[in-house]
Image (cartoon, rainbow, N blue to C red):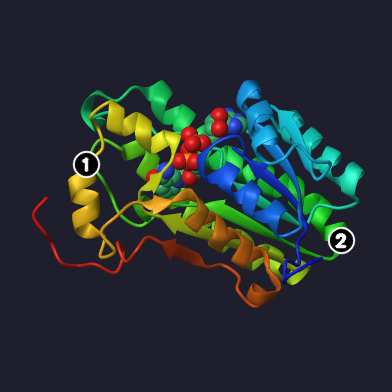
């Protein structure tokens, strides 16, 4: 393997778009083999093309909340490349609804995809990783995993759960050599955020005002943090929620938005 990536065979859920696609690109640029797993089959084909379409890029369509789909993806990566070393769980959704009128189905779906889906990917991969002597799991949390936001109750609850899932699995699987960490971004320029902007439900002025660096993150900046957490430079990092947020979390100063 090249340049400090100790985990060359990587499963990326939600790999057809946004942060997942950027992570796939970053891992493959560093010499890794990547399996992109996503619900959106057309987007998967485009994503593979955008990554050069080489033998080191595998794809599989499926849902993270379907255990058999995820198990098949893990098996495919393991059978083609011999092992599964790392997972990035980027499949996720956000729905904006006032809590008083929020739909139960929306809440359930958000928890299912964001939390249970991440859990299924982690568990399926970890079962293979133990045979390799270890690996690295990277959840995508959020600054909203540590604080609330209006009209995003289910999303905030799901990201809070991800942050504690990270710590719990880090403690349980550390002795098996599996490191479990999360990145916690603020707003990232991806199709998910663009959809919110288009719907008029994203407070860009407020996000920029609270972020000392004064801008959204680029998906590549989150991807670089994922590659770092999977690398030989992070071998003692376990159970960490790493803010990749331009200082958003550090900022206790209330500014006009
Ligand atoms: N964009 C941001 O500002 C931001 C900030 C913090 C955290 N995050 C988190 O990062 C992750 C990725 O977000 P993004 O902005 O790249 O979004 P995105 O919408 O660009 O990508 C999400 C991908 O997940 C896939 N997906 C959705 N449901 C799925 C399912 N059931 N099974 C498999 N794939 C599924 C979608 O098809 C899509 O390709 C999410 O967990 C999100 O909550 C995003």
Marks 2 and 1, how far apart at CA: 45 Å
In the displayed structure, does residue 69 sit left or right of residue 16? right
Q: What residue is drawn where x is 59% and y is 42%?
A: 21
- Of marks 2 and 1, which one's residue comes earlier in the chain? 2
Q: Which mark is residue 203?
A: 1
Q: Can you say whether 43 is above or below 255 in the image?
A: above
Q: What residue is drawn where x is 72% and y is 71%?
A: 4
Please tell me how crowded label 2 is: few (under 14), some (14-19), or many (20+) other residues with Cα within 10 Å: some
Q: Can you say whether 45 is above or below 23 in the image?
A: above
Q: Which mark is residue 235?
A: none
Whether residue 158 appears in this view of the structure is no
Quarter of the figure with residue 158: top left
Which element is circle 1 on?
A: loop
In the displayed structure, does residue 250 sit left or right of residue 169? left
Q: Does the residue tagged 1 have its C-beta within 8 Å of any atom of ligand 1?
A: no
Q: Which residue is mark 2?
A: 132
Q: Residue 195's spot in the image, x, y percent?
A: 36, 29
In the displayed structure, does residue 182 sit left or right of residue 245? right
Q: Residue 121's spot in the image, x, y percent?
A: 67, 43
Front residue of 180/161: it is 180
Front residue of 180/194: it is 194
């Amino acid at each position: 393997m090249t340049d400090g990536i100790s985990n060359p065979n990587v499963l990326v859920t939600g790999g057809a778009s946004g942060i997942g696609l950027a992570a796939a690109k970053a891992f493959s640029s560093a010499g890794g083999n990547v399996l992109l797993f996503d619900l959106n089959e057309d987007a998967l084909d485009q994503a593979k093309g955008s990554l050069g379409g080489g033998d080191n890029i595998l794809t599989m369509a499926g849902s993270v909340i379907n255990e058999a789909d995820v198990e098949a993806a893990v098996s495919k990566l393991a059978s083609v490349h011999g092992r599964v070393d790392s997972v990035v769980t980027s499949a996720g959704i956000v729905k904006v609804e006032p809590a008083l009128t929020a739909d139960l189905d929306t809440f359930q779906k958000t928890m299912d995809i964001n939390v249970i889906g991440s859990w299924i990917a982690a568990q399926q991969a970890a079962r293979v990783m133990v045979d390799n002597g270890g690996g690295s799991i990277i959840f995508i949390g959020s600054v909203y995993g540590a604080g609330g936001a209006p009209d995003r109750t289910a999303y905030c609850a799901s990201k809070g759960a991800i942050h504690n899932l990270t710590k719990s699995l880090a403690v349980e699987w550390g002795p098996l050599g599996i490191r479990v960490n999360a990145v916690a971004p603020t707003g990232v320029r991806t199709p998910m955020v663009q959809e919110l902007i288009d719907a008029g439900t994203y407070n860009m002025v407020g996000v920029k005002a609270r972020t000392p660096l004064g801008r959204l993150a680029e998906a590549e900046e989150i991807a670089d943090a994922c590659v770092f957490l999977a690398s030989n430079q992070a071998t003692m990092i376990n159970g960490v929620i790493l803010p990749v947020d331009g200082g958003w979390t550090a900022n206790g100063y209330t500014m006009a938005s």
